[in-house]
Amino acid sequence: MSGAAVRNGGSVRSMVRSPFVLMVGAVLTWFIAAFLVWPNLNVLIATFFPDGSFSGRAAEKLFSSQRAMKSLGNSFLLALALSITVNVVGIFIVLVTHYFKIRGSRILFLGYATTFIYGGIVLAAGYKFIYGDKGIVTSLLLTVFPGMDPAWFSGFFAVLVVMTFATTTNHMLFVGNALKGVDYQTIEAARNLGASTWTILRRVVLPMLKPTLFAVTILSFLTGLGALSAPQVLGGREFQTITPMILTFANSPTSRDLAALLAVILGVSTILMLAVMSRFEKRGTYYSLSKVSSALQKQQISSPVANAAVHTVAYLLFALYTLPVVLIVLYSFADGAAIQTGQISPGSLTLDNYVRVLTQESGLRPFVISVVYSALATVIAVGGLLLVARLLQKYRNWVASVFEYLLHIPWILPSALLALGLIISYDHPNPLVGGAVLTGTTVILLIAFVTVKIPFTLRMLKASFASVNSSMEEAAAIMGAKTLYVFRRILLPIVLPAAAAIAALNFNSMLDDYDTAIFLAHPLVQPLGLVIKANTDGAEGVEGVANTFVYTVLLMVITGLTMYLVYGRSSRRRAGRKNSAAGASPDPATSPALVAAGTEPAAPVR
Amino acid sequence: MIRLDNIEVSFGDFTAIPHLDLHVKPGEFFTLLGPSGCGKTTALRTLAGFIEPSRGAVHVDGKNVTRLPSDKRQVGMVFQNYALFPSMSVWENIAFGLRVRKEKSAESDRLVRDIARRVELSDEQLHKNVAELSGGQQQRVAVARALVLRPKILLLDEPLSNLDAKLRHQLRQQLKDLQSEFGITTVYVTHDQDEALAMSDRVAVFNKGVIEQVGTPQEIYDQAATEFVCNFIGDSSPLTSEFVAELNRLSGAGLSPGANSYLRVEKASLTPPLDGGRAVGLPGTVASRTYHGLHSRYVVRSHGTDVRLLVLEDGNVQPEVGAETTLYVQPGHVLQYHPGTGAALAKQDQAVALP
């Protein structure tokens, strides 16, 4: 904090003296009370105090419900299994793209990075349309092996496979980045001391990545625990997990307490895991010891057998990663018959699907709904938090800290719990929102979208305000500029590019949202994620499948473009000063803790 | 002990070292000195086995190691930033090479403790994390880690370059002491001439991938073999041919007026040498004086030359700017180089001053 701001007083007294601060504070207090604190508190009340006094009935119901208990077990099983599989695949793909000398590693990288541009329900739907019982690949396989089980790709195995591939995005982002920060001289030193390629990897490189690996493991665990769309689409009857159960129970008033209890269990587990993670992140990061670290050079695998094996596995994985994308793009141009049989010929490729989606009202509608919701939520979140972030950055006192902690509530709670809280708090007239009923209206989803995006947006905006050279503000103040004028003319133009990037990432991640919408969407105003899910159940027949392919391609184009604009160009600019970035402070944009719990650029399958 | 024969190193189209011959004697502290980008680190890395030369041979202790990987050459290396493994304790860092060799754990522990004692690391420090150590302690860990494997030679790649000035001076002495205690043949890379002169038995001065001169610190300072070495090491004033001709006239020395001539700043004086010596006096005017406390730097203009010199501030009255003074120079101290090749001219008979 600058000296000037301290002199002006970052104190509570100076805060309450400013009418501007009081106004923002009042709005903020209402928002936090109505949408962050009360709904979640209400879930606890509904669970343990359904009639005003303490009751263990929800717990009894849970223990006696075989389905619910099974789903709990399944969730933890999935979370554990996912923590292992994601690490195995994730570490492998990071090593072959960043650490080892592999032929065509740039192509491999692009293949593995496809999960950056499609995730969530879209990815789950994509895998079902390809490997599911009526899927393209399954149809083709059936013509070769008529005896095989068409539903081979379902249940625990299918959910685990899909979520594994979807979640390696975190490894690509964080582990890849941590690996780039490893000082190459330590590798040379180890080699000089006689260590083999394998020993160097095991004893020197991987231990340095341990804190990051630990963080991404927890993220994978949480992703598995809160999984929603993948078990719903691919789990079948025998493999259901907590979040789909919450959804089922929440829909009937008699079992709502059960839904609430499950949501509480999910929430407590999430908080515990995040607490452990942030503790480890704080004390466990190995900063490079020196100012002059040298950039990593790729390692040759000396054994020809191992080298061939690694190449083979790398390209097999590449095929697994890219096949869905290639097929979705290809079949988005195909006609219904081709989609049903899997047989495709050059003649059957047309633009008909795109014309239908983009011109017919029923095809275009979900897309427009999603765009409008995402745009509104983005504008409200980024616009509102611009002021809040500035004030939190300027005033450092206990009141500001309390506000900041409260605004992070959505970061530590799973979205199913947040959604459930909103439903049970606003299904009757509530004085907090002027006596209105929100459940079942179009507003409630917008509120949920805004709240979910608060923590990520706030942290990023605060970081960009903090990076503004405070002398500029002081210079403007000395020339007589008032607070708002300084904000408008000096600060805003500086943070605007960052704000635009944050807005773009937020917009992207809400476009294909499923987890929040499934709880809260208006029955007649269904966003894209819900329509895609409905299509996986065969609701709209082959045409629905074709529409989903078109949606997916459009989403991939939009996401890819945004990712390129936000990350692609800035990383190239950053490459010039890689030495300074090597070990110093962790980049806010690449810290795993920041991206936890549904705030990732492209949400993984849940 | 170390022989580099006819080494050529290229990276793609770029030839970093066109031709290098070098011979380091057993037990010697040998320094590769030069400006950044001169090829000294490339030479060291070639010796270490991190770079394969496109031509030539590397011999360590009479054995050709040109094609051997780094760990089979029996060379220990201390890196520019020490390259300590941040995920391991001090003990684990030092024991790393022993464990890779599958040394018995009791034996490893004995060797680690033994070397730690010799570099003055306490048992308590052995169990610390490397990040908790000071710069000097980290350096000792890096040296211990290299020496515990009993290498035949020790390579040091600018180990003092990322430290502040005071610590650098302190560690310089510490490194030199360690080297003399272990008596190990050491090759040291630096761009700091002060370091090179103070620590080395012999120095090789590099420029653009070529060795300009190999010699003891005194040789390269007093008898710089090329104009580059003369300019890179120490501080000297270029002399005009008019000045050189005047020196010849006064002393009868056979200096060549057409050559590029230099005079070290500490070799010119405003007072006649005590022994009367071979110095001749030239009239001059004080053009500037900068006070440094311990000494003052003077520029004295004489026969078209601005001669820079140092005067000790010992309390005596010194001439002010504008004053007429006499400049004492020994013709034998003038360094002369061929204007085309930059090579030193053979010293002529160092004549005594004419009466």
Image: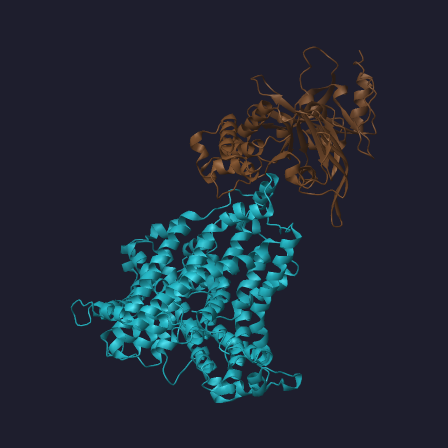
Q: Quadrant of residue A422?
A: bottom left
The reply to whether residue A571 is visible in this rendering is yes
Q: Is residue A460 visible?
A: no
The answer to whether B308 appears left or right of A429 in the picture is right
The quarter of the displayed image where residue B258 is located? top right
Spot the residue most to the left: A53
Chain A drawn colour: cyan
Q: Establish if B149 lies above or below B329.
A: below
State left or right for residue B28 relative to residue A464. right
Q: Relative to residue B5, is residue A516 depicted above or below? A: below
Q: Quadrant of the C terminus of chain A?
A: bottom left
Identify which residue, A381 or A187, lies in the foreground. Answer: A187
* Front residue of this view, candidates A7 and A497: A497
Q: Which chain is brown?
A: B
- In the rendered image, residue B156, in percent from the top left (x then y), is placed at 61, 34
Q: Is residue A355 left or right of residue B345?
A: left
Count numbered badges in the picture: 0
Residue, x 23% and y 79% (percent of image)? A429
Q: Nearer the viewer, residue B40 or A23?
A: B40
* Image location of residue A99, percent across then percent down: 59, 53
Q: Nearer the viewer, residue B193 or A597?
A: A597
Residue A93 location, x and y as percent? 56, 59
Q: Residue furthest bottom?
A: A360
Coloration of the structure image: by chain
Give residue B160's position: percent from left, percent from top: 57, 34
